[in-house]
Image (spheres, rainbow, N blue to C red):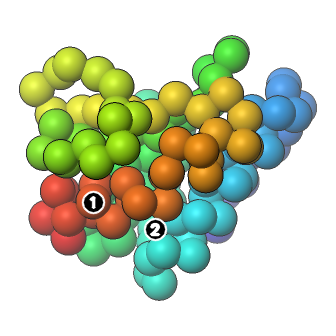
Amino acid sequence: MSNSVEKLLQDLQLLDGPQFATVQAVRELVAEQFAAVHEEVKYGGILFTAGVPFGGVFAYQSHVSVEFSQGAKIADPYGQLEGKGKGRRHIKLRSVDDIPAKQLAAYLPLAHRAAGG
């Protein structure tokens, strides 16, 4: 883990325990699904790269957002993607329990493929 990722996580833990737990659970899920994932702090969140940059996780006051850089190319099989921009889509998580409820594990490989992975 890079120093910048570690620092961001420390700040999140100090500010808000529930958001920190959700961000950590997302990071663990990404690490389980992609053998060689690189994390980098950018735009106030943690971006994920596994061969190609494909998404990131961002903590906000009332939720955590998992952003997909090419999310508009995803068919959205579970109807969980939000956003109307040209490329990005996201899934809002209000707790760790939303991760399985919103099928995040199914979206990660779709987002990776959509980004060219």
Position above or below: 13 against 49: above
Q: Residues within 10 Å of mark 2 (few under 14, many from 20)?
A: some
Q: Which residue is at 34% across, 25% downward? A: 82
Q: Residue at x 37, y 54 (%)?
A: 107
Task: Give the residue pinned by disc 1.
Answer: 110
Query: Circle 1 sits in a helix, a strand or a loop, which is it?
Result: helix
Around disc 1, counting alpha carbons within 10 Å, would you say few (fewer than 14), some (14 to 19), or many (20 or more)?
many
Left or right of 66 on screen, residue 10? right
In this picture, is 110 found above or below 18?
below
The residue that disc 2 covers is 38
Find residue 46 and report its horizontal and vertical position in percent. 52, 46
The answer to whether residue 47 is left or right of residue 84 is: right
Label 2 sits on what residue type? His
User: Which disc is residue 83 wearing?
Assistant: none
Q: Residue at x 24, y 33 (%)?
A: 88
Q: Earlier in the sequence, mark 2 or mark 1?
A: 2
Could you tell me which residue is drawn at 28 percent across and 55 percent down?
Answer: 111
Q: Disc 2 vs disc 1: which is toward the camera?
A: 1
**Among the 4 quarters of the image, the one containing residue 83:** top left
Q: Nearer the viewer, residue 82 or 14?
A: 82
Amino acid type shown at disc 1: Leu
Where does residue 74 sit, x and y in percent of width and height?
Answer: 19, 47
Disc 2 and disc 1: Cα gap in Å?
Answer: 18 Å
| Figure quadrant of the N terminus | bottom right
Whether residue 24 appears in this view of the structure is yes
Q: Evaluate whether residue 42 shows in this view.
A: no
